Image (cartoon, grey):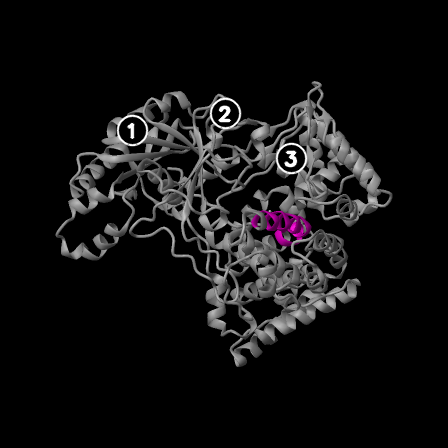
Amino acid sequence: MREPGLDRSGLPPAVRDIILDQLVSGSEDFKLVLSNVGGGGSATAIRNEDLELLDSAATLVVSFLGSAAIAAWAPAAVANLVLLLYRLRKKRIPITALQAAVLRELKTQGSLTVAEITSSLDQPGITDQDVEATLGQLSNIRRADGVKVGLVSPDPDGTWHAEDV
Amino acid sequence: MPLPEHFLSNAVDEVLGIYAPGASPLIKANSTVPADVTMAHERGHRELCDTSPLGQYMTALALTTRYSVSAQSGQKARLALRDAVEQCWSVQEGYATLRECAYCIGTNRLQLWGTIAKALPSSYRTALAAFPIDIEALTRELARHHGLNAEQRNAMLSMSVEFTGYVMAKAAMSAPLAQVLRSAAALPTPEVATAIRRNAPDTRLQKLKPHLTTSFAWSCLQNVIEGNRESEETRTTRPLDERLDALARDMAARAGIAYERSDAVDLLTLLPRLGCNASVDHRDGRDVGIQQLQAYSTEADVVGAGGDAAMKMKILPLEVAQDAYAFHLQQHQQSKAEHIVCELGAKESNGQTIAFIHPYCTKEQVLKAFRGQTRLSSLLDKVAKCDDSTAILIVMFAVRIAVDEVGRLPKTFAHRDWSWVVADALIGDRSPQWNERALAQHGTVYGAPVGDMNFDDRVPDAMYRVPATPTGNSGPAKEGYGRFSPVPDDVALMVLPAPMGRRARPVRVMPMNRLLHRNLVVASFPYACVGETLLNGYFSSIGSGRLG
């Protein structure tokens, strides 16, 4: 018997609750278990391996952002970063927290330059060079089955955009 | 005989929850919340958007998504809006839910609030907990005022809870934004997004929280009483609004965060810069007459109220419904309905279920059947103006039937075409409340959403405009004075791809004014019937406009 390990990841309860609720509302990914028809409620099941992915996504985000940034970010923003990381890993794309953060900026803001991404990330220690290298990785990332996918692409005007994967 | 409310509630319970293998279920239950209570929630969102700088920017972005000069500007606004919503989700949902609570107190429905509170998703509960108003302490305080009867005390308590929450939420939402918006070369821009994130209302809320005390709540109540009295004299809400603004500014100052008034951001100048071509009649709500303002604040995007009506319907035995159906067919001079849509509810533990029968005829059939009847001439004129494929409901029945006799329904109600509408959650391999294959022998099976109004990212296979009926499901699009009024001009039916291995086609309805592309073809008659059923039937549901 265990609860989803998000409690142990260091995420604040507000972030954890948003993640769990969003997992349910996006229930297509999960089995529906109608355990007590017409009665006292039911559940959406998460497979054990998916729970582990969720735990690891949360832990990666906590260690990437650090406690100060987590406290300074809106809970929904942290939750969505965890969910992005989780969903890509569920698609067997072994993305890192920095890669997820860069991708999230492009997904939430559309086309951006490297400098704009760095500024939007607003994370100490992350430079334009780091972002540029990360974009290069994201444009040609290898899935667990060996197939290469492009999560981002450059535009002719020097900006980058996220691809629908 | 169980009421349909229980049945829908059960159906919803079955889908909203999360279960970790080997652990206790984490239930995300929901229940059938009355429309006026949901309205109280929605009004909370609207108030915060109308009375804060960020809310004004979000309103401008939302208008741009609907009335953009180009698909690109619409898309950019959509992304920027999503990003902004993310920054204030907890403030918005926390306050809107608190407002629901206050409304229930004020309307003497504490028991209902108890039910709603238990059914709240955990993220909403956490958001609500960020507004720690000590209701018991306020109740005790009010009890000391001997001149108040129970109803008056509840009204005061409701006002105190609502306005204290509002002041705190407004303080959280009112981070300075005007300067960065003015200096931005183009909109939306990453600089603005960064500025909003650095002053995220959700993080500001945490700084404000320690300053929400019972004495502050009491002071809010006294200011509201005084502000209301002054507003009665001026016949505008400006005196009350000025008092609330001062309270929010004071609270922000005590929390050590900057504060900006909502009118610092000029909505009208933002619109063209965002690529929005909406023409908005913008007025300062504080200087509009109170009655007009009330009309604005109570207008609602309530399409699909049929669910409430359906739940109040008398449930008939099959034989009685059959006789009534024959009578109505005769009135319409038909031997059978052109199309019947049958909504199926959940299977109940007693082996029964409730089916909602929607028989439709065409515009042409109505005009022919009632031609020359002068007492109906006004209605017939309206029918004549409808689209040819408009689905016109003959009558609607709620029928109780044994689960294993559901196959009898198509044999009982004469029809040309038959469709089933079943909650998404009650069909499929993993939760086979209903067997899709068996149902499909009689007609197409459609899956309706229950509880969850969020549209997923799946690209619809098709989208149609549902033709308006002569009695009208929706009024024309209109601009409320001051702000956009979200009354849908028309409604779209979205047909989503069936999940792998499934037969039921998921269908959704949503107001056209929420779509980027509004030049949709008119639905064919069968789809019009399905659209009408989704709008007015038991599973009637439409995006309620909730943030998040």
Subunit of mark 2? B
The disc, 2 or 1, on the residue closer to the chain's N-terminal end is: 1
* Image point (17%, 43%), residue name: B331
Instruction: For mark 2, give the secondary structure.
Output: loop
Q: Which mark is residue B141?
A: none
Q: Which residue reaches farthest left?
A: B372
Residue tagged 2: B431
Q: Viewer-nearest of labels 3 and 2?
A: 3
CA–CA distance between discs 3 and 1?
A: 48 Å
Residue B158, percent from left and from top: 57, 62
Q: Dot 1: few (<14), some (14–19), or many (≥20) neighbours within 10 Å?
A: some
Magenta extent: B74-93
Question: Against B169, is B13 above or below?
Answer: above
The answer, for residue B128, to whether it is visible in the render is no
Q: Which residue reaches farthest front?
A: A156
Residue tagged 3: A163
CA–CA distance between discs 3 and 2?
A: 34 Å
Q: Quadrant of the N terminus of chain B?
A: top left
* Viewer-side residue, B452 vs B321: B452
Subunit of mark 3? A
Residue B210, percent from left and from top: 76, 58
What amino acid type is highlighted by mark number 3?
Glu
Q: Dot 3: few (<14), some (14–19), or many (≥20) neighbours within 10 Å?
A: some
The answer to whether A12 appears left or right of B489 in the picture is right
Q: Badges 3 and 1: C-beta atoms under 8 Å apart?
A: no
Residue tagged 1: B409
What amino acid type is highlighted by mark number 2?
Ser
Is residue B419 magenta-colored? no
